[in-house]
Amino acid sequence: MNAKALIAFEQGIKARFAAGELPFLVHLSGGNEEQLIEIFRDITPGDWVFSNHRSHYHALLHGIPVSQVEAAICNGDSMFIFSNSRRFYTSSILAGTCCIACGVALEIKERGGHEKVWCFLGDGAEDNGHFYEAVRFAEGRDLPITFVIEDNDR
């Protein structure tokens, strides 16, 4: 998926929200499409991706079909997109996925797996204790995990 397609998807959701079609809270992304596309070039289909309350771009770039992401949004579940087959998990809890991602990375390392874990969080979550504990745990055990902090200038 390219940047134009990502932007068009989010603009379509924004328009539906503005028209009153979505009576649910929706957190939109924007402005970092090119950077995310570059990062996702290194993410394989077998890798795990953990996301946050702004998960639409991550889900789409990790191969979750547009129809599935849109259905989750329309059902009020945009902050809770999950796909076991795509190895994709989200949480609306601030830094809530960091420790879970570390647990998955530990399991991968202990069984000698080759996949990797990617944990996306917002810049507000980097001040959270869950994040620091997860980073220290991952560094101390040399786990196959990358934390990606997205700055939305807020």
Image (cartoon, rainbow, N blue to C red):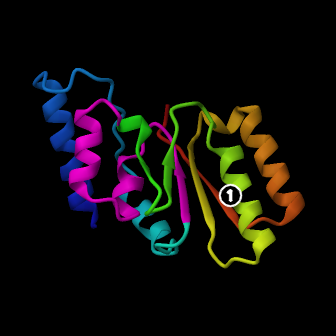
In this rendering, position of residue 46 left or right of residue 139 = left
Residue 17 vs 3, above or below: the answer is above
Q: Residue furthest left?
A: 19
Q: Which residue is mark 1?
A: 104
Residue 98 vs 153, above or below: the answer is below
In this rendering, position of residue 74 left or right of residue 152 = left
Look at the numbered disc 1 and give the secondary structure of its residue.
Answer: helix
Which residue occupies 35% across, 37% down? Answer: 78
Which residue occupies 20% across, 39% down? Answer: 13
In this rendering, position of residue 53 left or right of residue 102 = left
> Residue 140 appears in which quarter of the rendering?
bottom right
Residue 100 vs 146, above or below: the answer is above
Residue 31 x, y percent position in the rendering: 36, 49
- Which amino acid type corresponds to the residue marked 1 in the rendered image? Val
Which residue occupies 77% across, 61% down? Answer: 106
> Residue 1 appears in which quarter of the rendering?
bottom left
Residue 148 x, y percent position in the rendering: 59, 54
Q: Which residues are magenta?
A: 48-77
Q: Is residue 61 magenta?
A: yes
Q: Is residue 65 magenta?
A: yes
Residue 149 x, y percent position in the rendering: 59, 49
Q: Residue furthest right?
A: 140
Which residue occupies 46% across, 68% down? Answer: 40
